[in-house]
Amino acid sequence: MNIIEVTHVSMKFKHHLLFDNLSFSCKKGQIIGIVGENGSGKSVLFKLIAGFLKPAKGQITVKQTEITKTNTFPENLGVLIEEPSFLAELTGFENLKLLSSIKNKLSDTEIHSTMKSVNLFSEKDKKVQAYSLGMKKKLGIAQAIMEYQDVILLDEPMNGLDEKSIIKIRQLLRKMAEEGTTILLASHNKEDIHELCNRVYRIEQKELIEIPIHS
């Protein structure tokens, strides 16, 4: 069964035809790489799948719910798109606690565990205004994964991270996929694509073209 299905999607963005009859799908537990030049539409594609944007034509289904028809956001979907935004005067932990209070699914211990998994636990009580770019990115990954989501969309998640954190988060993503999480990963880093992805698509000529992983 396909977890995500994008079918004949066309999208105009700022009077520019970004996608034309674009289609692809992915199954449970896969890590799918999305590559392409800057401005090719990787972030826009993720926003379409997350329900933040609506296509001009076509349909998008996540876990058998047609997002374009129901006009709702997919359930159990975590998202990191572009640079994450948090409340600067709160600590990293307080930001995650505030976000988790919307669904009230997580204990403090579970939030701490998530921060450990992205190598951020030692900075949990530091205010976000004192965070580096890499620390903010790790906090963004934490908020995307902390509620045990079925589908995760990660847009350039490794940017600004130190090597130790990159290794830890790659291990984390592999483990999540093995446990059944479906992950879409947009990255300019060839190592991320080669080491993590089951399949890779390049945005090319307004479509998604599957390419060899080592291309």
Image (cartoon, rainbow, N blue to C red):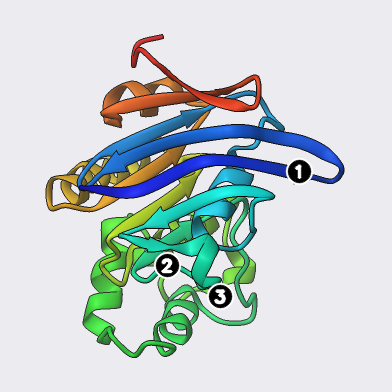
Q: Position of residue 205 (x, y in %)?
A: 65, 19
Q: Secondary structure at mark 3?
A: loop
Residue 58, placed above or below residue 145 = above
Mark identifier at residue 112 = none
Extreme residue in the left direction: 179
| Tag 1 residue | 12
Residue 150, placed above or below residue 159 = below
Mark identifier at residue 74 = 2
Mark 1 to mark 2 CA distance (whole Å): 22 Å
| Labels 3 & 1 near each other (Cβ < 8 A) | no
Dot 3 surroundings within 10 Å: few (below 14), some, or many (20 or more)? some
Residue 5, placed above or below residue 163 = below
Which comes before the other along the chain, label 2 or label 3? 2
Dot 2 surroundings within 10 Å: few (below 14), some, or many (20 or more)? some
Q: Of the residues shown, which amino acid type is indicated by label 3?
A: Lys
Q: Of the residues shown, which amino acid type is indicated by label 1?
A: Lys
Question: Viewed as shown, does residue 88 lie left or right of 180?
Answer: right
Can you tell which quarter of the image residue 17 is in?
top right
Which comes before the other along the chain, label 1 or label 2? 1
Extreme residue in the right direction: 15
Which comes before the other along the chain, label 3 or label 1? 1
Q: How many marks?
A: 3
Can you tell which quarter of the image residue 53 is in?
bottom right
The residue at the point 58 percent across, 70 percent down is 128
Q: Position of residue 37 (x, y in %)?
A: 64, 23
Q: Position of residue 145 (x, y in %)?
A: 34, 62
Question: Viewed as shown, does residue 1 lie left or right of 16?
Answer: left
The residue at the point 62 percent across, 77 percent down is 87
